[in-house]
Amino acid sequence: MFLRLTLIGYQKKMTAVHSTAHLSMISGTLYIVSAPSGAGKTSLVKRLCAEVDDLAVSVSHTTRAMRAGEVHGSDYYFVGVDEFKAMIATQAFLEHAQVFDNFYGTAQATVEHNLAQGQDVILEIDWQGAQQVRGRVAEAVSIFILPPSTAVLHQRLQYRGQDDEATISRRMRDAVTEISHYSEFDYLVVNDDFERALAQLKSIIVANRLSQRRQRQVLMPLLQNLLNH
């Protein structure tokens, strides 16, 4: 299920950052997708992008070690801590945050380019990054993915086989912090059934594309014709 929430201050003006005005004028939509580790966010977003046209996930930079099967430039841009901090110094990130012992960040130039081409872009980021992006892109649409229960979340983390029990315990503690920020998001999706959750994510994308703001760009010739008769 998903629930439309009222985001306090959603209509406030963006902060006075040089890139903000540019990002607010572009034609694509920026989506923020957050979730506690193990909720299924990455798998859902991967299927969503594969099945919805003109939708892509932004590839983030990270300082964490590459996992088996991951590809540099596809899953993440894997960089060293010094390189990451240099990018922070040059304001290259739209958002960045430290998660556990590693840094993650979204390169602003890539996001701007894709949105300018009319492509919708998904940022898979945590609540800290989501707060930063909302402060700079007022039109961003945010989605939080919830697990159906604490027991299921713990089970999924164990089945992934990526972490030892101490790390899983830490992820479970941090999940409480992540979930406590649910009210900051526009939509909530519970991933109790993968296909149903995927369908709900698709419905959010479709509904947004049918909004007056988006349709006005596409239908302006028709609207002008109808209004001139």
Image (tube, rainbow, N blue to C red):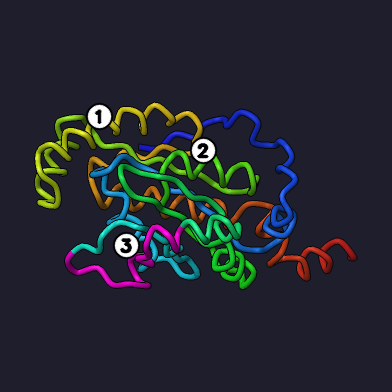
Q: Is residue 107 above or below residue 178?
A: below
Q: Label 1 sits on what residue type?
A: Arg
Q: Quadrant of the C terminus?
A: bottom right
Viewer-closest of 52 and 159:
159
Q: Residue furthest front?
A: 82
User: Where on the picture, by quarter, is residue 213?
Assistant: bottom right
Q: Label 3 belongs to which residue? A: 47
Q: Is residue 180 above or below residue 35?
A: above
Q: Residue furthest right?
A: 228
Residue at mark 2 to residue at mark 3: CA–CA distance? 21 Å
The mark found on residue 186 in the picture is 2
- Circle 2 — which element? loop
Residue at mark 1 to residue at mark 2: CA–CA distance? 24 Å
Residue contact at pointers 1 and 2, CB within 8 angstroms: no
* Tag nearer the camera, 1 or 2: 1
The mark found on residue 173 in the picture is 1
Which x, y percent locates residue 110?
Answer: 54, 68
Mark 3 is surrounded, within 10 Å at the Cα level, by few (under 14), some (14 to 19) or many (20 or more) other residues, namely few
- Circle 1 — which element? helix
Q: Is residue 100 above or below residue 160?
A: above
Tell me: 59 left or right of 171. Answer: right
Residue at mark 3 to residue at mark 1: CA–CA distance? 28 Å
Which x, y percent locates residue 67?
Answer: 21, 62
Query: Which region is colored magenta?
Result: 68-84
Mark 2 is surrounded, within 10 Å at the Cα level, by few (under 14), some (14 to 19) or many (20 or more) other residues, namely some
Mark 1 is surrounded, within 10 Å at the Cα level, by few (under 14), some (14 to 19) or many (20 or more) other residues, namely few
Residue contact at pointers 2 and 3, CB within 8 angstroms: no
Q: Is residue 49 magenta?
A: no
Viewer-closest of 221 and 89:
89
Identify the residue shown where x is 56% and y is 52%. Answer: 208
